[in-house]
Image (cartoon, helix red, strand yellow):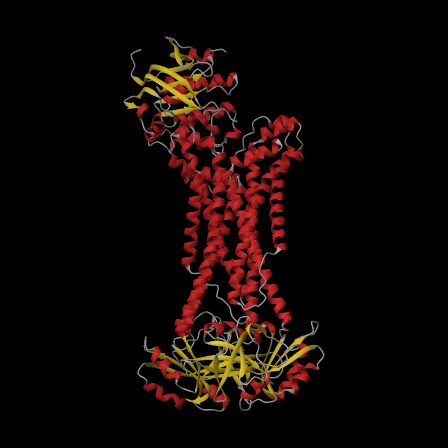
Amino acid sequence: MDRRVLIRLEQMKKHYVMGEVIVEALKECSLEIYEGELLVILGPSGSGKSTLLNLIGGMDTPTSGELYFNDLILSRSSEKELTLYRRREVGFVFQFYNLIPDLTAGENVALAAELVPDPMEVDEVLEAVGLADRKDHFPAQLSGGEQQRVSIARALVKRPKLLLCDEPTGALDYQTGKVILGLLNKISQEMNSTIIIVTHNTAIGNMAHRVVRMSSGEIAEVAYHENPLPPERIEW
Amino acid sequence: MSTLTRRLGRIIKNTRGQFIALISIVMIGVLVYISMNTAFSNLSRSQETFYEENHFADYFFHVVRAPEGVVKQIEALPGVINATGRIQKDVSVYREDGTRAIARLTSYPLPMDREVNQLHLLSGNMFENQAVQIEAVVDPQYAEANQLHPGDKINIISEGRKVPLRFVGTATSPEFVYPMKDASSLLPDPKEFGIVMIPHLQAQQILNMTGQVNQVVIQLTPDTDPKKLVPKIEEILEPYGKLASYPRSDQLSHAALQAELDGLKVMSRFMPIIFFLIAAAIQYILLTRLIKSQRPQIGIMKALGYSNRDIILHYTGYGLAVAIAGTIPGIVFGVILASVFSDMYAMFFSLPQTIGGVNGKVLLLSILLTTSVAGISGWLASRGVSRIRPAEAMKAEVPKIGGKILLERWGSLWKKMNTSWKMSFRTAARNKTRFLVTVLGVASTAGILILALFTSDAMDYMMTHHFTHENRYDYSVHFSRPIASSEISSWWQWPEVENMEPVLEVPVQMSIGNTGTDGETEDELLMGLRTGQYLKGIFDEEGNPISLPEEGILINERTAKKLAVKIGDYVNVETKLGIGSTRKGRLKVMGVNRQLLGAGSYISFQTANHLLGEQGTMTSVLLKVEANKGSITEERLKEMSSVDSILSRQKEKDNFFSLLDSMIYFIGIMVAFAAILGLAIIYNASTMNFSERRRELASLKVLGYTKKEIRGLLSKEVWMQTGVGLLIGLPGGKLLGKGYLQAVNTDLFSFPAIIYPRTYILTALGIILFVWLGHTLATRRLNDLDMVEAMKERD
């Protein structure tokens, strides 16, 4: 794959001090993530995949090693710079959607749109996730799948270069989960965004260009898929 | 200790900021309750005991002079318990340094046992009848201000003669608890005016009134209707030149003390209620929220077998803990403040048996009040626990149903609003109770601030009005007898005198109707001023200056109200000068005058003279002198025997300022209370809001919101509450002030409900400061808002 590198990890480590114990959440990782790539990070709980995602998302800084986003050295950025990074470059999809209950679907998306100078049209994004008719509904009036789609729309409206998804189907049933994955796949193909999905569901790996397997805080394996499967053909 | 109690301890520890905020509100409530109620009950008990033990009169009658026999006649009337005849007269006192003061010479028949308005000796000895020199006791303030020591001489001028009195002690009586010269001297100047008490026989001698009295004071049986009895007494006194008759409620000292008691009563009822209610409301909200967030735990407790009662008691315990922790320091500080109040009152009022100390009933009531308020709010908040079914409760809570709010119907406005404002409006609409409690809290804080600050506005307004508009003279010089204007024409040659205007004061009895005898009558002082006068300003009810007409009367507002007369009506007047025969007149009401301090109606100098059948006669003169030349004039006047008293405007002013100084403490305490209340309310509201929305806020942080933006988002709601609170609180404060004044104001003196814009601005600024501080304190943990929290499963 001869695409441009968007994110580079160089011997990146993350330690947490918990009381008197030092937990090595991430042991020396090196990895390059490309523009337009759909990357799936797989691993059981405690494998370090969420830590990795948090670091890439600018929510945390590594203990040692370097982390680059284009020319920006995230590993040495101040909190302010990291906030700006998250604001401009990253879209985030949570396992439990984390929508603001007091705002309608449309307003939840607008809340993110107000953060950037050149956002997409709220209606357009909602249309893209198939929720144009649910714009004025509050989260409590939406199903889990619909809420996750709002969450994806909220992430996309900022036109992020990077879309991070933390167990996006974790709280959804099988059918709904597949719809969400299909949506992410479509975004990857049509918008040329870099998408990173973190999950413990190995089957999801089949739709990725590349799969990174994590185990005990280390990258255990990196696998390339020349011909990823469309989500509707994935079974689990 | 049971596990549930230990758990309660942990809940308190986890919410310690809010717990402390709550106990401070309760503490202040208790403190105010105890201090004001103790002060009130002590003061009113002192008043009651003193009045009773010293046989305070129920009714007062003034005549020119009457034979002593009338006293027996009056005493024989059914309904009269006791009647005392006495002489009371204002005389000049010559001091060693040549300056003059006024003494209200009051006589007391000896022995005093059964008499009305008995004296209570405070220091030294009581006067005796057979003493070689006339012995006198004096009110304690005058004695102190003039540094009198037992054996000192007090020289009074009586019937043109200098009479030395020997000072033997200080004493007070129910009618001199707050010695006031007249209704216009609200602030006593004890150096210039005092009560001098001497034996009745000797008073008769030195005043040339052997066998006579000029006042009769009576005590009535409780079931006597004064309306029926008083006319009978007036009939007895009729031949002797009746000057005035009035009930106890119009007696100056009593009215001043009663006004203070009334004010204290209002404050002692209303202030603690604000604090207790707010504490209860916050507690209710806090517990409701706590219980909601602890649904799963409650489910587990129930599944384990704890009864509804156990769990309700567990959460109600939080309220009781607040009550106990707040009441104990509240009692301690309340008792301390109560003694400060008592000392302060002892300074203002000479009540011999000032009852101090702790009032057990008030303490007990305060404990009962706080615990029951806490108990009720705790129970109200936690009674819903019984509806929780263990199986359901252990599952995560169903998310709140979102919905449109009223404001959204206003489509055009709603569309223009940015998303974070929409969010704040919806949260507010969703938590109506909390929003409302915070709004009312802010409004109460504003109300208390205005109440604290406005008294100084009213004072300042009164002072400005009184000293710069109503009274432009430097000295008001009273003569011992009416004199001809020509007698003082030489004063014009004094180089320092800039202006001089004569005054003829005529005390009258005023009535309406054709005969002048039927219906209401009022005692009134007519002030005859030269038309076009400058040194005395006259104002109508709206505060606009009115000019004095050649004929007719500018009647005093309060007198007009009592007699129910209006402009264009006629009033009958009957002179009560005390010398010469009574003269009658009829005056057309040309206007109504309002005086903030003082009383009296205005007529022209001409009309006043005409009323007395005189020409150019005056009783006093108003003087305006060159700046800083006052001492020269004072020196000149000191020498004159015809001068009875000199009223210096400057001294009056100084007196006023010293009162304003003493008010600063009161204002400071009230502002501090308001500050704590405001801080505590906002701190609680913001803390609740913040901790409830942690997860939401963490996700916003992930989305790229800066800390400042998140704080701004949270504060929008607080400022909304502040804005609405101020909208209610500022006019509410004015109403509070008016209500307070209504309780304090009497017929004799009234404070204007004046609030300067400055006070509103200061109040609003104060509130903004408290809100900002409370909110910043509550959201300081925004810094360690963990973004990883947003990833976690819902707990």
Q: Is residue A160 at least partly visible in the picture?
A: yes
Q: Nearer the viewer, residue A206 or B15?
A: B15
* Along the line of sight, the residue nearer the viewer: B315 or B466: B315
Q: Is residue B669 above or below residue B319?
A: below
Against B198, residue B460 (above or below) is above
- Report if residue A211 is visible in the image: no
Rendered view: B201 above or below B313: below
Q: Where residue B440 sits in the image (x, y, percent)?
A: 52, 48
> In front: B713, or B390?
B390
- Quadrant containing the N terminus of chain B is top right
> Residue at 47% across / 40% down in the picture?
B686
Which residue ends up furthest to the left in the rendered image? A71
Of all residues shown, which one is farthest toward the right? Answer: B78
In this figure, what is the number of numbered marks?
A: 0
In the rendered view, does A93 fall on the left or right side of B203? left
Q: Quadrant of residue A111?
A: top left
| Residue A210 image position (x, y, % from top left) | 38, 12
Query: In the image, what residue occupies the spot 41% across and 35% down?
Result: B710
Q: Identify whether B778 is placed above or below B230.
A: above
Q: Quadrant of residue A17?
A: top left
Residue B596 x %, y %: 47, 70
Q: Nearer the viewer, residue B557 or B291?
A: B291
**Residue B87, image x and y in percent?**
57, 83
Residue drawn at x 58%, y 31% is B295
